[in-house]
Every structure is written in structure tokens, then in C-alpha cells.
Amino acid sequence: MNKRILCSLMAIAIAMASLAQGATRSPYSQYGLGVLSDQSQGFNRGMNGVGLALRKGNIVNTLNPASFSAIDSLTFLFDVGLSGQITHFKEGSASVNSKNASFEYAVGSFRLMRNVGIGFGILPYSNIGYDHSSTSLLDIAGNSVTETYSGSGGLHQLFVGAGWRIVPQLSLGVNVGYIWGTYSKSVISSNGNNSVINSLAKTYSANINNYSVEVGAQWQQKMTNQDNLTLGATIGIGHKLGADAKCSILNINSLTSTCDTTVMVASNPLATPMTYGVGAAWNHSEKLIVETDVTLQKWGSLDFPAYDEARGTYAPTSGLLKDRYKVNAGMDYVPAPMSQKYFNRVHYRMGAGFSTPYCRINGSDGPKELSLSAGLGLPLQNGWNSRGNMRPVLNISAQWTHASAPGLITENTFRINIGLTFNERWFAKWKID
């Protein structure tokens, strides 16, 4: 057991190092705190990320901490995942492709005592990664100005949670996490003819270290001998992140060989929003699960730091963010979980979703997202856990996401997600006759 615990801690350490690398190439990640991450795991990626009402004993469902109380009493679950994606960007007649891969998460769960389960792990919160430029003419003499935009960073969460089944139908849970990360965004403007006459570089940065809290509840009601209905709800506590945001302006004139630097600091302007989620899942005979989730993030009530060109100030500004709504629906079907035939034990999944943006771009809403997904849960055999739902599972899914807004860049992303759930009997009691 000690070796397995050590391996779990090593996997989390590897995930922490890997999450520090950029997991996006989207120009939209330059706004707000970046592109918000999908915090689902391998088993529900094929269902397009639903999980607020999912309740099973052989999965680690971090989307609702109340689900930890359903963990099987004899097992320790550990789930790791990675993804690779190809994105096609299009603006007018111009288009370009980009690809990247990342180690996404490492989570685990086990039964602490009767009716109480524990979850832990590391998850991404947001990602920033972009590099693009544009050039325009200033006058008929051929003078031009080039603006180069680049950025990197993001936020990550290390969490521990607990779920408690108070009565057979009702479970409550809480996730408490440490959220941290840095970001750096720069805009470099240069103009001139044969040589650079003047360049202006603005760099926006912050270093964040704070906490996160989420509470959840699940109510499971038996409807018939073969059907259960589970209702789930979560609330994420929004709060200030306790980090100062910095704006550094560097003005270089190559003709006079002068360089002016200005540094402005906005005090504690960054925050996470209050988040509300509800979901409903129908489970038929442990063969078919159908779920729908709705989530609201109250970004619109938050300010975000911005530089005011006219006033020459850097301060929290309202109207840059807006409330984000997200609706997902998905299903999981396994023909016969206890069958001796392999393909009868495979999980077949599919899902769809729609979300609105949380950032405004030049006074207009950012891109809306439409997504479709499909996946498989492939049970793996080993010499110890070879029966029932105790098998390790390889989860593979594909997802297509379309992001667009009038007059802005259109993104089409094809993503492959791979997750491996280890299901080990750590707490079995041996008997010798």
C-alpha cells in the first residue's frame, strides 16, 4: 500500500509540473483569466463533461464532492488523464492550424469510514497561451505599425474533498483547494520605415496564491425496481484572489536612444465568481445513464484590471466580464456489465453542450461555444480485479468544439482525451480457514 501511495503522490507531482505548461494556443486566452478549463475526468469526457448528478462507486467524480460518499468501501481509485488537440483558426480569408498536448489531471478517492468518502488531486482552472501579430500602414510614405501579442500562464488547483451520506437518499460534500498560478501578457507596438523609430511594450502580469471552496449535494431517489433518479447541486464560493496585478510600460526611441519605463500596480483586482450548478441523472438498471447539467458563473459582477489610454491609469474596470451559462447533456450505455463477453462490458458514451462567453472583446460579447463528444470506456483485465465493476478502465473520447462570434476569429478544435482509472482492492480483509 505504501508503494501505491508513493506512486499516487508522484503522479500528482508530475501533473503539477506538466500543468505549468501551456495547454492552449487560442487568441481568446488573452482576455480575463484565460480559457476556462474543462474540469471533468476521463469517464465523463465522452459525455461532454456532465457529472453534477453522477453517483457511482467506481469513479472519481470531482464535479460534485457529494459523490465521494458513493466510493466502494474496499477500493482505492486513482485517475490520470492527458489530451491532444488540433485547432483550426480562421479570420476572413486567412486560416492557420495549431496543435498541442498536455497532461491534464491526477485525482484519487477512497472510503474513509462508513458513509464518508475522500477525494483529492490536481486540476487545471484556466490556461493562457497565444502569439500573434498584425501590421497596418500609417501613411502613403510606407510607414507602418506592427502590433505583437503574446502571453502564457494559467491557474491550477490542488484540492482535497469529502462526501458524507447523511441518509440513504441524501449526501453532502465539500472541496477545499489551493489555487495558484502566474500569467504574463504583452503587447508590443513598433512603427517606422527602414528601422524602428519607436516601440511601446506593455506587459500585464500577476502571481496568484489563494484558496477555493465548493460545496455540493446529491439526492438519489429510487423510482422503480430498475430506475434511479439523482439530483445534484453545487455552489462554488467566489472571492478575491489577494493578488496585485502589474502593468509595465516600456517606451523605446531608437533615434534618441532613450528608454522610459513606467510601472503601475492595481491592488487586489482579481477574483473568482460565485458559481451555481444543477444536474439530473437517470440510471436504468446500471446499464444506461442519461444526464443534463446547467451551470452559471457570475463573472458579470466582477471587475478586471485594464489600462486606460486616455487617462494613463491601470485599475479595476467594470463591463469587461459577463455571466457565463453552460448547458451539457450526455449518456453512458453498457450492454451487460457482468457479461463474459468483452464488448458487452464496454461503456459507449456521447454528449453535447453549449456555453456563452465570460469576456467582452472591444465592447462586444466573446465567442459562444458548441461542442459534441463521443467516447468509450474499455475495461482492462488483471490477475486481481477481473470481475464486476472492479476492473481498471481506459477511457478514450473525442470532442469537437466550435467557437465563434460576429467579426471575430472562428475556432474549430478536435480533441482526443485519454484517461486511465486504476481500481485497486486496498482494504479487503483476508480470512484463513
Image (cartoon, rainbow, N blue to C red):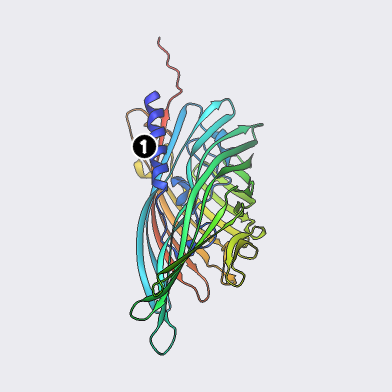
Viewer-side residue, 312 vs 98 = 312
Please, what secondary structure does the residue beneath circle 1 have? loop
Q: Is residue 334 left or right of residue 232?
A: left
Give me the residue at 63% from left, 36% from top. Answer: 171
In this view of the protein, which residue sits in the foreground, 268 or 17? Answer: 268
The answer to whether 24 appears left or right of 168 in the picture is left
Residue sticking out furthest to the top: 433
Residue 143 visible in the current orientation: yes
Identity of the residue drawn at 53% across and 75% down:
406
**Quadrant assignment for the C terminus:** top left
Report x, y in % for residue 162: 58, 34
13 up-or-down from 34: above or below: above
- Image location of residue 46, percent across then percent down: 45, 52
> Which residue occupies the foreground of this view, 352 or 298?
298
Number of numbered labels in the structure image = 1
Q: Residues within 10 Å of mark 1 (few under 14, many from 20)?
A: few
The residue at 63%/55% (across/down) is 296
Give the x, y percent position of residue 335: 43, 45
